[in-house]
């Protein structure tokens, strides 16, 4: 499975490219702390820290990943539970728990 990212985020740890999906946690964006949202959405562009914009609320999920194909540090990413055309992305990711995923930054 491939997990795509729009930027190289500051949260991305060494060896993030091959990460094991440990769990998929359903969350409501409005219940997440501002500090966690800043941690999860921060990236650097032209020497400046920017933040990926998320809505104020909604049904999302936190993917808990372990870098280095399950031997490295933990890290997370926030994703919407629904994809294009109403696809259930939460079930898709849950079906891949325990697998090593290829994490790619795509422009």
Image (tube, rainbow, N blue to C red):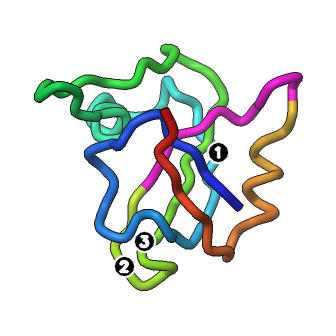
94 horizontally vs 61: left or right: right
| Between discs 2 and 3, the one toward the N terminus | 3
Mark 1 crowdedness (10 Å alpha carbons): few <14, some 14-19, many ≥20: some
Q: Seen from this angle, which residue lies furthest left?
A: 47
Toward the viewer: 45 or 91? 45
The percent position of residue 38, horizontal first and vertical second, equals 29, 32
Q: Residue at x 37, y 70 (%)?
A: 15
Q: Secondary structure at mark 1?
A: strand
87 horizontally vs 63: left or right: right
Residue at the disc numbered 1: 26
Confirm or deny contact between disc 2 and disc 1 (CB under 8 A): no
- Position of the N terminus, as image quadrant, is bottom right
Q: What is the C-alpha distance between the residues marked 2 and 3?
A: 5 Å
What number of labels is visible? 3
Q: What is the quadrant of residue 32 in the picture? A: top left
Toward the viewer: 39 or 44? 44
Q: Which residues are magenta?
A: 76-86
Q: Residue at x 26, y 45 (%)?
A: 10
Q: Secondary structure at mark 2?
A: loop
Position of 71 relative to 52 (above/below): below
Toward the viewer: 50 or 45? 45
**Which circle marks residue 67 in the picture?**
3
**Disc 3 versus disc 1: nearer the observer:** 3
Mark 2 crowdedness (10 Å alpha carbons): few <14, some 14-19, many ≥20: some
Q: Secondary structure at mark 3?
A: helix
Q: Residue at x 61, y 42 (%)?
A: 61
Confirm or deny contact between disc 2 and disc 3 (CB under 8 A): yes
Confirm or deny contact between disc 3 and disc 1 (CB under 8 A): no
**Which circle marks residue 72 in the picture?**
2
| Magenta span contains residue 64 | no
The percent position of residue 14, horizontal first and vertical second, equals 29, 67
């Amino acid at each position: 499975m491939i997990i795509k990212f729009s930027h190289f985020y500051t949260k991305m740890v060494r060896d993030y490219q091959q990460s094991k999906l440990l769990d998929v946690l359903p969350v409501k964006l409005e219940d997440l702390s501002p500090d966690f949202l800043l941690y999860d959405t921060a990236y650097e562009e032209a020497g400046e820290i920017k933040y990926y914009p998320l809505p104020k609320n909604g049904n999302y999920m936190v993917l808990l990943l372990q870098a280095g194909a399950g031997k490295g540090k933990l890290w997370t990413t926030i994703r919407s539970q629904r994809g294009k055309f109403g696809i259930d992305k939460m079930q898709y990711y849950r079906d891949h728990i325990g697998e090593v995923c290829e994490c790619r930054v795509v422009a």
